[in-house]
Image (tube, rainbow, N blue to C red):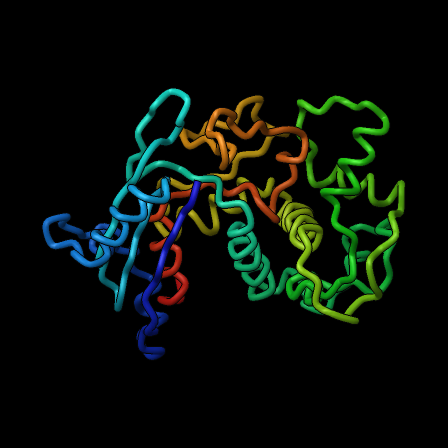
């Protein structure tokens, strides 16, 4: 499944930022769109792509605060022929990291954390020295990728793969097994899920809330993102989202979720193209 979005540039007048931030965010006005006025060139391109390449997903294109085009193509669940709608929730995967970064910067703005604070300040048994919040945010921590490390532990020890792990449980496993890291901190950039899984754990530790509850209260609700939520296999036996990923070659098999869909922060947010547009606009408006 593909989820595409293009957003506007342009920022609000800084003089009005504080005044505007006190008003309810007008998402209804943002989402005004008449399909009859949709961009004909974009529609022709997407219809062709859907027809010849099997593009399956939702599209929203906006410019200067106005939606130029949006549409849904194909199935939410190919096996049951369940059609996508514009409000279908997609698993955002690593787009979640953008929202985790936003949450971390909120905590920094509120004086709850410092960017150069060490992970050991929050998790004393963390086995790596010199890893700060700033290095996690910029993928310069040098950590190993917890996805492969945890997967190896589960398979070698024949552990239950149906129940999702929590972030705290992954942090405990890292402390227990002390897997070798890739590099020393700040030596180089290395895109890595571990960085934002740890940030998710820090959000939970500092806020004394689950990641899902923090994101809902501090990002989704204030922005007016009514179709966005965090779903973790540590909480849900079956993820309650209508869009199912499939094998890209045969379409015969849906993507099964397992224990690795428990940790959040690096992933875990489910959303729609319209809510992603709202998120972008809320950020630009200083919301």
- Report the label total: 0
Q: Is residue 160 above or below residue 287?
A: above
Front one among 113 and 32: 32
The residue furthest left is: 36
Q: Is residue 59 above or below residue 10?
A: above
Q: Residue at x 16, y 54 (%)?
A: 38
Q: Is residue 263 above or below residue 142?
A: above
Q: Residue at x 87, y 47 (%)?
A: 179
Q: Residue 116: where, in percent of width, then height?
A: 72, 69
Q: Is residue 230 above or below residue 115?
A: above
Q: Residue 30: where, in percent of width, then height?
A: 24, 56
The residue furthest front is: 52
Q: Is residue 262 left or right of residue 8?
A: right
Q: Quadrant of the C terminus?
A: bottom left
Q: Residue at x 20, y 55 (%)?
A: 29
Q: Residue 166: where, in percent of width, then height?
A: 69, 35
Q: Quadrant of the N terminus?
A: top left
Q: Is residue 244 left or right of residue 224?
A: right
**Residue 132 sits in quarter:** bottom right
Q: Residue 27: where, in percent of width, then height?
A: 27, 52
**Residue 257 sits in quarter:** top right
Q: Residue at x 26, y 54 (%)?
A: 45
Front one among 226 and 208: 226
């Amino acid at each position: 499944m593909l989820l595409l979005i293009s957003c506007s540039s342009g920022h609000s007048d800084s003089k009005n930022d504080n005044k505007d931030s006190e008003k309810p965010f007008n998402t209804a006005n943002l989402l005004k769109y008449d399909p009859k006025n949709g961009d004909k060139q974009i529609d022709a391109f997407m219809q062709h792509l859907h027809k010849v390449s099997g593009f399956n997903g939702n599209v929203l294109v906006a410019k200067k605060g106005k939606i130029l085009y949006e549409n849904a193509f194909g199935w939410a669940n190919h096996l049951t022929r369940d059609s996508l709608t514009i409000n279908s929730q997609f698993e955002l995967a690593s787009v979640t990291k953008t929202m985790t970064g936003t949450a971390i910067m909120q905590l920094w703005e509120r004086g709850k954390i410092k960017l150069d604070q060490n992970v050991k300040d929050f998790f004393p048994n963390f086995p790596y020295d010199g890893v700060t919040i700033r290095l996690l945010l910029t993928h310069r921590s040098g950590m190993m990728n917890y996805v492969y490390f945890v997967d190896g532990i589960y398979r070698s020890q024949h552990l239950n793969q149906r129940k999702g792990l929590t972030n705290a449980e992954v942090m405990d496993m890292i402390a227990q097994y002390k897997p070798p890291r890739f590099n020393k901190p700040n030596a180089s950039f290395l895109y890595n899920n571990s960085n934002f899984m740890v940030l998710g754990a820090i959000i939970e530790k500092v806020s004394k809330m689950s990641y899902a509850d923090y994101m809902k209260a501090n990002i989704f609700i204030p922005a007016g993102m009514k179709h966005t939520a965090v779903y973790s296999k540590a909480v849900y036996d079956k993820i309650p989202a209508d869009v199912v990923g499939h094998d890209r070659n045969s379409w015969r098999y849906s993507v099964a979720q397992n224990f690795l869909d428990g940790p959040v922060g690096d992933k875990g947010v489910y959303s729609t193209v319209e809510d992603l547009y709202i998120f972008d606009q809320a950020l630009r408006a200083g919301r």
